[in-house]
Amino acid sequence: MSDTFKYLSQTGTEDEPAQEFLKKYTDRYTPEQQARLEANGGASTANQTKYNTVVTNQDAIDSASKGSDEYRGFSSDSDSGRNYSSGAWGSGDLDAAGLAKKYNLDNSKEARGDGHIWGRNPDGSEVYIGKSSMDLAANDELISNHSKQAGDEVDHSGVPESLSSLGDIKGAILTEWKGADATKTDVPEAIKEDVPIEYSPEIQQAQERVATYQNDIMSGKTTDDIFSNAESKVAPSFDATKGAAGIGTPKSGDSLQKATEATDSFLQNKKFDVKDKYQFQAQ
């Protein structure tokens, strides 16, 4: 229903009801009322143009900001985000091929899951390094690398044990990986523009009604209408000679004469009743 409902104008058309409403109430105040309205700050006006401030180049700003993401797309409180942000990962001396050769990683087929190691560049692109295995858990160099990571990582070099998981091995290898340099992309300054707010005809009409109500109050029109209507009403008359039927009857000479005749008739009837009851005879 909301898709088809429209406010009809006073003429039965559907065209610009708010404008028609305004036109109907133009010059609705007397000179005295208009003076009071001006003295109270002037008329309230509806449908004044209002604006929203928008950034017109937001896409360009987002794109430039993404190119210099220090967390490489990870959340700032994640282990991966902290390691990339601190430089523990991605700031080494070997590329993917060099690491695969050094640690005998299988890079013949890219895949995801346990053992597969991916590095992530500042622009969000990923580089496949290879697949590791737990055979590297006892590698002294990787054990030493593991303690270089950000966070509360166990220093396996100080205890008589190897790396405990494929995740430990992945982190240790990424400390030696040389990712792409963080490209410093200049983030453009925001270009702001005031865009006018567009209201529906229904909202416009509602605003016109509110403004008209406020102006009627401040101009004294509402008060004048109430009291002028009260003064134009004539108080009803009351004719005690006619009982309940006498409420609201006009006080005229004709009604008084009729009331007198009715009273005489009533008394005459009572007199005949009494004479008939007691058999009074004229002497």
Image: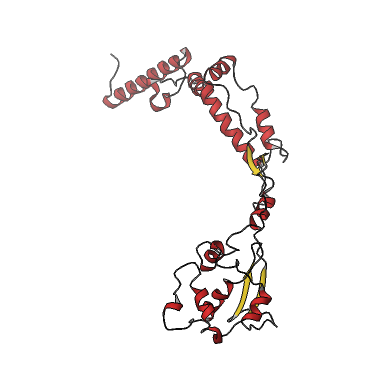
Q: Nearer the viewer, residue 72 or 210?
A: 72
Question: On the rendered structure, is 31 left or right of 185?
Answer: left
Image coords of residue 136 (percent x, y): 55, 84
Residue drawn 73% across and 39% down?
15
Q: Extreme left residue here?
A: 278
Q: Extreme bottom residue here?
A: 135
Q: Quadrant of residue 30?
A: top right
Q: Nearer the viewer, residue 195 or 65?
A: 65
Image coords of residue 40 (percent x, y): 52, 20
Q: How is the image coloured?
A: secondary structure
What is the number of callouts on the image? 0
In the picture shown, does residue 48 fall above or below 119?
above
Residue 111 visible at all: no
In the picture shown, does residue 170 fall above or below 272?
below
In the picture shown, does residue 172 fall above or below 1?
below
Residue 95 visible at all: yes
Image coords of residue 234 (percent x, y): 48, 19
Quarter holding the C terminus? top left
Residue drawn 57% across and 68% down?
89
Q: Nearer the viewer, residue 228 or 150?
A: 150
Image coords of residue 244 (percent x, y): 39, 27
In the picture shown, does residue 103 fall above or below 211?
below
